[in-house]
Amino acid sequence: MTPEKSSLHTRNLHRNPYDFDRLVSCVPELKHYVFENAYGTTTINFSIPKAVKLLNKALLQHFYHIQEWDIPDSNLCPPIPGRADYIHYIADLLADQPKEIPVGSSVQGLDIGVGANLVYPLLAHRSYGWKMLGSDINLDSLENAQRILDHNPDLESFVQLKKQPDSDFIFRNIIEPGDKFAFTMCNPPFHDSEQSALKGNIRKTKNINKSKVQKPLLNFGGQQSELWCEGGELGFISGMINESALFSSQVLWFTCLVSKKENLYKLTQLLQKAKALEFKTVDMAQGQKISRMLAWTFIPQKDRKSWLI
């Protein structure tokens, strides 16, 4: 029996070992990829893209009642447990002032770079009933996200999508006058070039297969906007911080994942320069590696509770 995944958030539904009998009952095709490894553990081969996608589909259906979830092979296939963690840590962040987690559609969040998989809005609404807006610069990704929504019509009033027409902007063109968001979230592009992204994919594949790999696997694939941008992670989040100051009165908490711990010093310096009133980092598990959530706000503490009522 696989031990409880204690590194995951205490409210994460995926702390316990996968019940593959139940998951296969949701997605029968998954059974072709389930096997018992040398340690007697029932699992799948996570280096097979099809297996990972089917596992995601089953998890989303079983735990979150999401029907007909699918993504093109060229898009990122996100690990559901790690993505759920980000949502739960945002819930903790919002609960800090009223001392209880705010639920329901009066809480509105913005997912920057929602991608074809739509995972963060799906998890956010199913977990806490929040209303979500997802933005992306890639029209194909948004069209696939819309197909997922079309198969889940009960989400129509709670999840909306919006195209970012200018890759130089993050919040501009998305946050309109009069909008108010309890939080924004983002899993930013990690690499600074396509070459860097390919090298990173090969490293990940080697870690899973424990062997020499020359070609990255598709479940570690992704569109350019998902994997790399000029300046890499540091450049992207720096731009986000600078731009967030322009929308300081319309968002309670800005948040972003930070993969490289060494980037935190420069980012916190930038937050001080931008005159954020408070910022914090929260360590969290993201798949096979440790990531952290960086959160900042320009709203005085005495005014924060009114955002969530």
Image: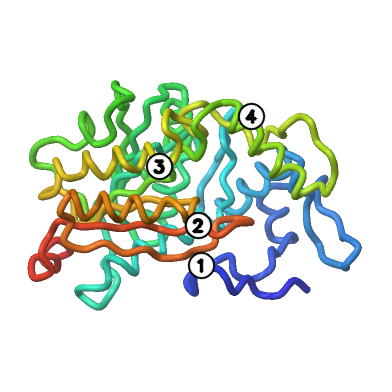
CA neighbours of label 4 inside 10 A, class few (<14), some (14 to 19), many (20+): some
Q: Which numbered disc covers residue 12?
A: 1
What amino acid does circle 3 point to?
Leu
Q: Nearer the viewer, residue 190 or 62?
A: 190
Q: Which of the 4 quarters of the picture holds residue 163?
A: top left
Q: In 3D space, how far apart are the residues under numbered discs 4 and 1 (Cα atoms)?
A: 27 Å
Q: In 3D space, how far apart are the residues under numbered discs 1 and 2 (Cα atoms)?
A: 16 Å
Q: Which residue was labeled with disc 4?
A: 73
The residue mark sitting in front, 2 or 3, is 3
Report the residue at 42% width, 28% height from top.
Answer: 230
Picture quarter with the N terminus: bottom right
The residue mark sitting in front, 1 or 2, is 2
What amino acid does circle 4 point to?
Asp
Q: Nearer the viewer, residue 99 or 196?
A: 196
Give coordinates of residue 122: x percent, y percent. Answer: 43, 49
Q: Is residue 277 left or right of residue 271?
A: left
Q: Which numbered disc covers residue 234?
A: 3
Report the residue at 61% width, 48% height from top.
Answer: 56
Q: Is residue 41 left or right of residue 60?
A: right
Q: In 3D space, how far apart are the residues under numbered discs 3 and 4 (Cα atoms)?
A: 28 Å
Report the residue at 75% width, 61% height from top.
Answer: 21
The residue mark sitting in front, 2 or 4, is 2
Q: Secondary structure at mark 4?
A: loop
Q: Earlier in the sequence, mark 2 or mark 4?
A: 4
Give coordinates of residue 144: x percent, y percent. Answer: 48, 29
Q: Secondary structure at mark 1?
A: loop
Residue 20 to residue 114: above or below: below
Residue 123 to residue 220: above or below: below
Residue 231 to residue 291: above or below: above
